[in-house]
Image: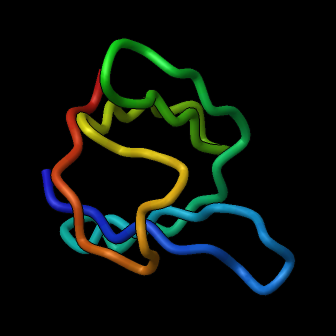
Amino acid sequence: MKVILSREDAGNLSVYVPKKDLEEAVVNETIEGDGKILTLANGWELQFPNLTDDTKLPQTLDAKRL
């Protein structure tokens, strides 16, 4: 699914899912292989392949819901 990953003014990550009109804060980040798994405040876990700490944000990315 396509999501928009951005960084808030306070420095926290947030994810916006346009098809669900859902915006949630990221509460946990786990590194797995060559990407990351982000856990949202609502409990969703999204896997982002090839996401690194130096990725320019905001950006539309492909994510897989686990």
Looking at the image, the residue that sits furthest to the bottom is 9
Q: Quadrant of the C terminus?
A: top left
Q: Is residue 12 left or right of residue 1?
A: right
Looking at the image, the residue that sits furthest to the top is 33
User: Residue 43: percent from the left, percent from the top?
Assistant: 58, 31
Display coloring: rainbow
Instruction: Name the residue at 69% across, 33% down.
Output: 28
Q: Nearer the viewer, residue 58 or 19?
A: 58
22 is higher (above) or lower (below) than 30: below
Instruction: Name the residue at 21% across, 34% down.
Output: 64
36 is higher (above) or lower (below) than 54: above
User: Residue 34: percent from the left, percent from the top?
Assistant: 31, 23
| Quadrant housing residue 27 | top right
How many numbered badges does the structure rendering display? Answer: 0
Instruction: Name the residue at 37% across, 35% down.
Output: 46
User: Residue 44: percent from the left, percent from the top?
Assistant: 47, 33
Looking at the image, the residue that sits furthest to the right is 10
Q: Nearer the viewer, residue 6 or 25?
A: 6
Q: Nearer the viewer, residue 30 or 52?
A: 52
Instruction: Name the residue at 35% across, 29% down.
Output: 35
16 is higher (above) or lower (below) than 25: below
| Quadrant housing residue 51 | top left
User: Residue 17: percent from the left, percent from the top?
Assistant: 32, 65
Q: Nearer the viewer, residue 19 or 32?
A: 32
